[in-house]
Image (cartoon, helix red, strand yellow):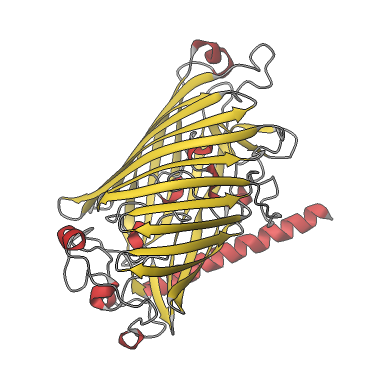
Amino acid sequence: MYRRSLRRIRHRAYLAFTLGFMASAAASQEMPDHEHMGHAVSGEMARHHPEPARPRHKHPAAMRKPSTPVAMTDMDHGTMGPAHMGHEMAGHGSMSGFLGPYMMAREASGTSWQPDTSPHEGLYQQFEAWSVTTHGSVNLNYDRQPGLRGADKTFVSGMLMTMAQRPLGDGTFGVRAMLSPEPLMGATGYPLLLATGETADGVSHLVDRQHPHDLVMELATTYSRNLTANSSVFVYGGLPGEPALGPPAFMHRTSGMDNPEAPISHHWLDSTHITFGVVTAGVVLDNWKFEASTFRGREPDQYRYDIERPALDSFAGRVSWNPARELSLQVSYGHLNSPEQLEPAVNENRLTASAIYTTPFGDGHLWSATAAWGRKLLSPGDSLDAYLLESSMILKNNWTLFMRAERVMESELTHDIPGLEDRAFVVGKVSVGGIYDFIRTDHAKFGIGGLVSRYLLPDDLKVVYGRDLTGFMAFGRIKLL
């Protein structure tokens, strides 16, 4: 009976996700070309001639067509003209930030920031006072991991996210929801050498596999109130949600979102992006953001379709700074109470720092790069570092090229091998790949791609994993624009 119930839940979840994504794609096909509205604002004008603040509760709704979808992407990535101005200038076609008086392109996952030049892709609609945007992508992947501990698998990954905001009193109220089809790949996730974290069954560790993300990745609300023309205070609450810890999650970074493979440094940098119980409060002062969170430290359990009981037993703080439109910096610190289900007596302090650079170049091309460092301080246990460098180049001729290089100190890879169970190893991985979008409409693109990964191991681990390890992944994807 339990298996039949679980199958019914999976089937309904799959239908809900698929129908929602298809509905969004269908809506995108109906959008007239003359309603394309971008978000990018000229760098010099935005930096040196900020606009005066306007009351957030007086949106020019009369200038908008209710229920008319509008594109939110600026394919020129930074050019400015009458159809590419922000909503404060053009009156419609884009959304201001949920957390403050700036354009929404600055906001990434949770309350994290990215460069103002980041593309903000999605479908825009206006319903009375509500401004709504929807974006997402779905990948069908074939993954083959090499060596003695490798495996192969075909699976689906991706996400569908809808965000809405409206005036409320003297501020702005926002809601957001994000779903993922990844629970359909099964409890053990997909093969990914050198990846660790979480569990498939509540008994054994997931090692050399990437866990599936939960069906519900985010259900959150926000409220912000402008204090001056360039400052605000805000509060964010999620069940689940993302605390103020680390850089934007890898599937939301421009430098990493087109790569369907998770980083092996995920649990050093951004693994808290699905946390069951988060409250964050912060202040925005021009290009600075200071914020603090209390949240549940425990990682999601092996049941990927439910909403887990919230708790506020951990804390984190983050300082973000966007010194230029192309650059976003952050440092953050957090204390995670008993994050791993299989090691409940171990707490973790986490320290991260990152820099994201995104810039347009040439005739409509875009380049983005992220450099990040994370440190786990386990108590009791070791201090473990991870480094990540990833980059993506989005070319106007429908090609996207990406790479990722990582160096991680791991203590879980050999936890079940006698004689090696208490050792930490420095391992590395380099991946390169690309996507060709063979069909592209105004608001969706359909592409095929692949990547190749090379694994770097110390000699002691080559006995366990094998030598000369090279893996690959082939995939097709649909992405809303």
Q: Is residue 141 left or right of residue 335?
A: left
Tell which residue pokes out farthest to the bottom in this image: 62
Tell which residue pokes out farthest to the right in this image: 1
Q: Nearer the viewer, residue 276 or 402?
A: 276
Image quadrant holding the C terminus, namely bottom left
Q: How many marks?
A: 0
Relative vertical location of residue 67 with respect to residue 227 in this rendering, above or below: below
**Residue 99 can be seen, yes or no:** no
**Image x and y of residue 175, in percent:** 51, 68
**Image x and y of residue 146, in percent:** 51, 26
Relative vertical location of residue 157 with respect to residue 439 in this rendering, above or below: above
Q: Is residue 311 left or right of residue 461?
A: right
- At 46% from the left and 43% from the top, the residue drawn is 246
**Residue 420 can be seen, yes or no:** yes
Q: Nearer the viewer, residue 35 or 409?
A: 409
Image quadrant holding the N terminus, namely bottom right
Q: Nearer the viewer, residue 190 or 205?
A: 205
Q: Report which quarter residue 43 is drawn in.
A: bottom left
Q: Report which quarter residue 278 is drawn in.
A: bottom right
**Image x and y of residue 239, in percent:** 61, 59
- At 23% from the left and 54% from the top, the residue drawn is 396
Relative vertical location of residue 204 with respect to residue 69 in this rendering, above or below: above
